[in-house]
Amino acid sequence: MQSEGRIARHCAGRRTSSPLAGSLPQMSTPAERPARFDVGVVGAGRVGAVLGAALRRAGHRVTGVSAVSEASLRRAEALLPGVPVLPVPQVVAGAHLVVLAVPDDALPELVAGLAATRTFTPGQLVLHTCGAHGIGVFEPAAESQLIPVAVHPAMAFTGTAMDVERLQDCCFGVTTVDLARPLAEALVIEMGGEPVWVAEEDRLAYDVALTHASHHLVTLGAQAMELLTVAGVEEPARLLEPLLSAALSNALHLGELAGTGPVARGDADTVARHVDLLRTRAPHVRPTYLALARATAQRALLSGRLKPSAADPLLRLLSEPDGDGPA
């Protein structure tokens, strides 16, 4: 398998003779892949069910999944057929690898509760999928002697079988103790992903970056399609797709040099007309436009692409609460 060669390359040079290594599941040879685990998935949301399916496809045995809502029950049935739906304590008990796929804000309480009820077992590999948390969230379970792992797939999930295929070459932010790093990275590779190491102290910055890029891009796209509909365009998505795809590619490959448009050029009169139109046609979009245009102008000024003489009137316009400053 292609993933086996990738696992071998990642694990090379990471072995250790530390006493803790004895509690870690051993890599098999010659592929250097993790031993087959019994996996318990807590949360059959869009992420949990998909990762469970990916681990199952890699040869691990999913022994239980928790699901409460109708949507999660349907998702578990579709992506993990034959896997029993169990209460959380039963999902965790006996599993070699526990996947905690719950919302960021729910994770600390879940970990604390499982630790207080002594549900975790020593040596158990416990992996959560939250971007904003590292392994510090496992501190209440320190006495359980579990192996803590934070693995966050940097992908937008639909919660369908399509996502399992889309995991191929998806980057996963990985944070764990040093001795478990080869194992955590190997699991990511087995699911088809690419492990990217994120230090514990940088975990929140990592999450802010991904949230700012992906979630706000969705908002931006939705607002642009709404404005095009107002303008009478029948298929706004068809119009925007090549433009946004090219803009994103340029931004990722060229950085600041990809900046273009009236704000980056310092065309304050045009920007003022934009703001006037938004006031009457889409007032709820105007604050987003002002904030992003202001950030764009400031970055263009700092990078030297926008001259101060052009930036001053533009920033005055964009700095007014209602965008009514002098242009």
Image (spheres, grey):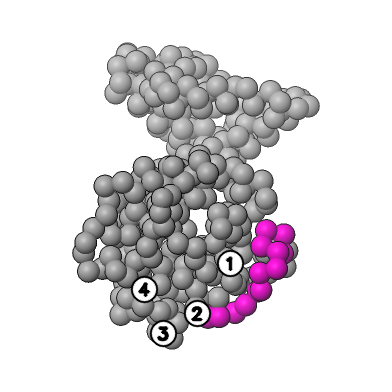
Is residue 29 placed above or below 216 in the rendered structure?
Answer: below
* Residue highlighted by disc 2: 93
For the residue pair 313 and 33, the one nearer the viewer reads as: 33
* Residue highlighted by disc 1: 62
Q: In this view, does 222 lie to the left or right of 271?
A: right
For the residue pair 176 and 235, the one nearer the viewer reads as: 176
Q: Are marks 4 and 2 in contact (CB under 8 Å)?
A: no
- C-alpha span from label 4 to label 2: 12 Å
Task: Identify the image quadrant of residue 6.
Answer: top left
Read off the magenta span: 77-90
Q: What residue type is labelled 3?
A: Arg
- Residue 173 within the magenta-colored segment of the rendering: no
Visible residue check, residue 91: yes
Q: Which class describes the residues within 10 Å of circle 3: few (<14), some (14-19), or many (20+)? A: some
Q: Sequence-wise, which precedes: disc 1 or disc 3?
A: 1
- Secondary structure of the residue carrying tag 4 is loop
